[in-house]
Image (spheres, rainbow, N blue to C red):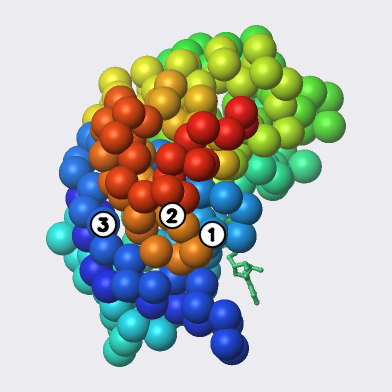
Amino acid sequence: MIEIANLSKRYDALMVLEQVSLDIHAGEIVALVGSSGSGKSTLLRVIAGLTDIDAGSVTINQKLVLNEQTSLPPEERNVGLIFQDHALFPHLDVYHNISFSGVSSQQEIETIARQLQIDGLLKRFPHELSGGQQQRVAIARSIAAKPSVLLFDEPFASLDESLKHALLSELQQLIKARNMTAIFVTHNHREAFALADRVAFLHQGSLAQVDTPEKIFTQPSTEACAEFFSRGH
Ligand code: ADP
Ligand code: MG
């Protein structure tokens, strides 16, 4: 579903991504982990079409979306990007925020809202919601747009632990039930283990290891990886 090949990017002297290659299958959830500054957000932004590159290519659902000559705009890439700062439309109620893309039927929207436990909030406006509720609406909106690929950039960083845990398992079920493909950026390895089929560890702009959660934890291939996973995140 996603083929990332030899991606490199620098900001002046700083090499932010270095020869990053990663293939992600349809229906797979990959957690992208690594310390702050390792290049996680940059990689997601490159896939989404918000940042250019120096070398490499990205193919999504067999469509070349990025190489040194070509860069399709975000809306032609069939991806949904969800940030920590969920920018909801303040003048639209929850239902119309979720239905904004026009892709899902009313029944589908009601189902998604029910699964994310926001079906009682459909007539409210964003300013009448808690942070956690707003984040659920943002996730519902992305899923209702039916992209091939969902890209999450630390979406739960501002939520408290118990809420985070509940949302993670709901989100996993939603993605799996729809056979969507997702990359989930986090610097929290517990989140990665709870959610992901595979974990990709990014270290100083290079993918140091890509493995199942069990394998990457029990058999880290580099010292940096071992050190990262032994920290109490
Ligand atoms: P992460 O999401 O893993 O914390 P980022 O992808 O945000 O890492 O950043 C990787 C590196 O690139 C950091 O050193 C960061 O300071 C740098 N960086 C990110 N965006 C820019 C930019 N627009 N200009 C210059 N440097 C940047
Ligand atoms: Mg980041």
Residue name at image x 29 percent, y 77 percent: 56
- Check residue 47 in the rendering and tell me which mark sits there, or answer none: none
Check disc 1 and give the amino acid type: Ser
- Secondary structure, mark 1, is loop
| Residue at the disc numbered 3 | 22
Residue name at image x 54 percent, y 59 percent: 38
Check disc 2 and give the amino acid type: Leu
| Residue at the disc numbered 2 | 202
Residue name at image x 59 percent, y 88 percent: 12
- Check residue 38 in the rendering and tell me which mark sits there, or answer none: 1
- Secondary structure, mark 3, is strand
Q: Quadrant of residue 161?
A: top right
Residue 200 shown left or right of residue 110 in the figure:
left
- Secondary structure, mark 2, is strand
> Compared with residue 223, is residue 156 higher up or lower down, i.e. above or below?
above
In front: mark 3 or mark 2? 2
User: Real-space Cα distance between discs 3 and 2?
Assistant: 11 Å
